[in-house]
Image: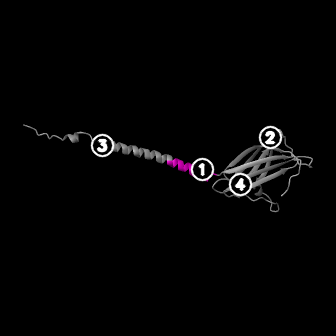
């Protein structure tokens, strides 16, 4: 008895390399897209968090002024605070440390417990984006040790503390008086 085995055509026996290569390329593109999407998501998240972050520019100046006609020198502390972020910033406190002495330029927390008949500063100073404000204080008869010539400023907001340090400027009197505008 003869069995009838059907012969399959040669085309079916050969693997379909075109389909396999196309499927492999598709899988590689899918993996590449997944990897790129995760990196893009991380970049967008980082950019968003940086955009809502508080950014403050602090420019401190401490000067020892020897003015003509004044027998003793006096110290002047100037601090400029500028909001360089994208959202409003609320300044709670501006303090400095010069020659080992702590100096308070602005403190909104002092207003909370003061009696009604005393002057109280506003509770918080709001700085809009791009807006700046100045804080200054004159120290007469400065009792500090003048060996360390650095001035450190701390600006406290509702969420962060910003610190800046600068050198002390020693301003000598000029030979001619300054013109006043």
Mark 1 or mark 4: whose residue is earlier in sequence: 1
Percent position of residue 179, x then y: 86, 55
Lower position in the chain sequence, tag 3 or tag 1? 3
Residue at 77% of width from left, 53% of height from top? 135
Residue beneath disc 4: 91
The residue to which callout 3 is attached is 18
The disc placed on residue 50 is 1
- Per the rendered image, the range of residues in magenta is 40-53
* Disc number lying in front (3 or 2): 3
Which sits earlier in the primary sequence, circle 4 or circle 3? 3
Residue at 44% from the left image edge and 46% from the top image edge: 34
Quadrant where the image shows the C terminus? bottom right
Check if mark 3's residue and mark 2's residue have beta carbons within 8 Å: no
Disc 2 secondary structure class: loop
Q: CA distance from mark 1 to mark 4?
A: 19 Å
Q: CA distance from mark 3 to mark 2?
A: 77 Å
Mark 4 surroundings: few (<14), some (14-19) or many (≥20) residues within 10 A: many
- What quarter of the picture does the N terminus occupy? top left
At 50% across and 48% down in the image, what residue appears? Answer: 40
Label 2 vs label 4, nearer the camera = 2
């Amino acid at each position: 008895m003869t069995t009838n085995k059907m012969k399959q055509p040669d085309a079916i026996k050969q693997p379909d390399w075109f389909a396999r290569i196309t499927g492999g390329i598709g899988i590689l593109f899918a993996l590449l897209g997944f990897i790129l999407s995760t990196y893009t998501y991380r970049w967008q998240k980082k950019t968003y968090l940086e955009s809502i972050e508080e950014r403050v520019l602090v420019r401190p100046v401490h000067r020892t002024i020897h003015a003509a006609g004044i027998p003793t020198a006096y110290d002047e502390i100037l601090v400029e605070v500028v909001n360089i972020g994208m959202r409003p910033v609320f300044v709670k406190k501006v303090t400095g440390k010069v020659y080992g002495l702590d100096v308070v330029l602005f403190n909104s927390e002092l207003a909370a417990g003061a009696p009604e008949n005393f002057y109280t500063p506003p509770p918080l100073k709001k700085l809009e984006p791009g807006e700046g404000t100045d804080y200054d204080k004159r120290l007469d008869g400065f009792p500090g040790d003048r060996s360390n010539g650095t001035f450190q400023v701390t600006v406290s907001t509702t969420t962060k503390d910003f610190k800046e340090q600068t050198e002390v400027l020693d301003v000598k009197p000029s030979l001619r008086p300054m013109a006043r505008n």
